[in-house]
Image (cartoon, rainbow, N blue to C red):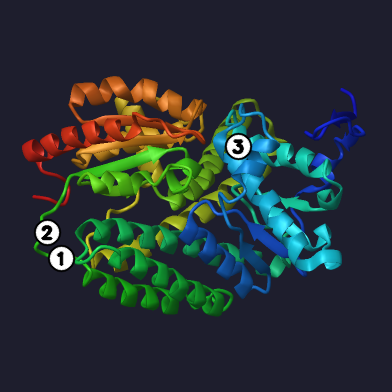
Amino acid sequence: MATEQRAVKKAKGPEPVKIVSFSSLTEKVGRFNLRNKTFLIPQMNRIGGHLLAATFRSFGIHAKVMDTYKGLGLGQEYTSGKECYPCQITTGDILYHMKKEKERLGDAFNAEDYVYFMPEADGPCRFGMYNKFQRIVLDTLPDLSRLKIGSLTTKDGYSLRGIIEEEKVRDIRKASYLSVVVADILDRLLWRIRPYEREPGMADEFIERSMRVMEEAFETCGAKKEFDRILDKLEELIEEGKDIIDPAIPRKPLIGIVGEIYLRTHVHANQDVIRVLERYGAEVVNASIAEWVNYTSYDRLREAKIALRLGLKSLRLNSLRKHLRSILSYGGELLYQEYRQKQVYRRVRALIDLAEDHKVGHLEKILHEEDLFNFDVGTEACLSIAGIVQYARERFNGVVNVYPFTCMPSTTTSAIIRPLMNRLRIPYLDTPYDSSTQPGREAAIRTFMYQAHQHFKRHGGRFHD
């Protein structure tokens, strides 16, 4: 394989050909110590991004959530349209942010002062190539070629080693995971109260203010591991949020959302599909971010167990110790995550009837019971297919699959789940997205919601008996 790749920046008229070294993909993409750097976090889930940034600031890391979708034109300028839609958005986000930083700082601007966060996943999903592609783009721009891309990977369950002092790694990981769970709770609180709010806009205003309160709580308490203080503040907010609900408004059809994690979470990318569903009479529950974090730990544990069994069968005794260490490490990580998540949901559900999160081990069991798919294949299809079946078992009144146009895991989900949903007579809708607005999308959602209302009249719902 050649050691260099030629990349030409789009421009009017001829320009010198820029040389991008493949060594850049290893030297300027990976784990970097974040001390004395500005850590730039793309906005996927708005609340989750802000709570995560606050957690990092608690540990002395200058973390900032970038504006999103304002640079989509820049992202499209440097992409062909064949990339996954989130790649276009995040490419635009970093280019737009750095453009604004250069305007703000002038001659004092230095790309080496920043680390841009873009994690990755192994397997067939194109997400694993985002940071490589973005590295090539940044290397074609002289002012940004020294901007490093900080990448965590599913290969080690998103380990945080290398970004901060070793003695603080475990603490920042625990606090970061709690921030993910709390962000999921605030999102689910919004979706629970907004369809029943006393006055339009009350729920959105409340959740925005709540995000700022929890942001301050994580920045103040995260590094001190004062997690009970954080959860006490969360409980206060939930008590306040409950008062927004108008008890005179009857419960509505319950709709579950699955799909690709970025699109189902990023309200600009999915054209605010949850709000559109609510407009036509839905109460919505979206798959959580914590579910994906738990899945990465669960899958690494599962792989370690398989490797141990193979090592025993082939008598590769030298590798057994390594596999046992992995089992203990990922098993302990998953045990902590499930304990912490269960603790938070138990406290919250004592105050309001929010939907519980799915346990990944239970989702794998569902796939075996229904003989639909297998965790050996991997990707988010594992979670989406099993999650849809669980929604059906929990008497949801419909399911929406949200994903980027041409997304392979979500297309697989659709192909497998459609026949099952037809047999169960549960409304199901695919909503693939790109930067265009499909003229028939809202009509499809209206039709879907009509079917969901009919299902609700016949069967009720999980919280509606």
Horizontal side, residue 4 vs residue 45: left or right: right
Give coordinates of residue 213: x percent, y percent. 44, 75
Task: Specify the amino acid type for callout 1.
Answer: Asp
Which residue is rendered at x = 17% and y = 32% of the image? 451
Circle 3/circle 1 CB separation < 8 Å: no
Cα distance, mark 2 to mark 1?
6 Å
Vertical side of 248 occupied by 136: above or below: above
Give the residue pinned by disc 1.
246
Give the residue pinned by disc 2.
249
Circle 2/circle 1 CB separation < 8 Å: yes
Res 201 seen here: yes
At label 1, counting other C-alpha atoms closer than 10 Å, the crowd grade (few under 14, some 14-19, many 20 or more) is some
| Secondary element type, mark 1 | loop
- Residue 457: image quadrant is top left
Work out which quarter of the rendered image holds the N terminus and state it: top right
Which residue is rendered at x = 19% and y = 26% of the image? 424
Res 323 seen here: no
Give the residue pinned by disc 3.
127
Q: Nearer the viewer, residue 101 or 317?
A: 101
At label 3, counting other C-alpha atoms closer than 10 Å, the crowd grade (few under 14, some 14-19, many 20 or more) is some
Mark 3 or mark 2: whose residue is earlier in sequence: 3
Disc 3 versus disc 2: nearer the observer: 2
At label 2, counting other C-alpha atoms closer than 10 Å, the crowd grade (few under 14, some 14-19, many 20 or more) is few
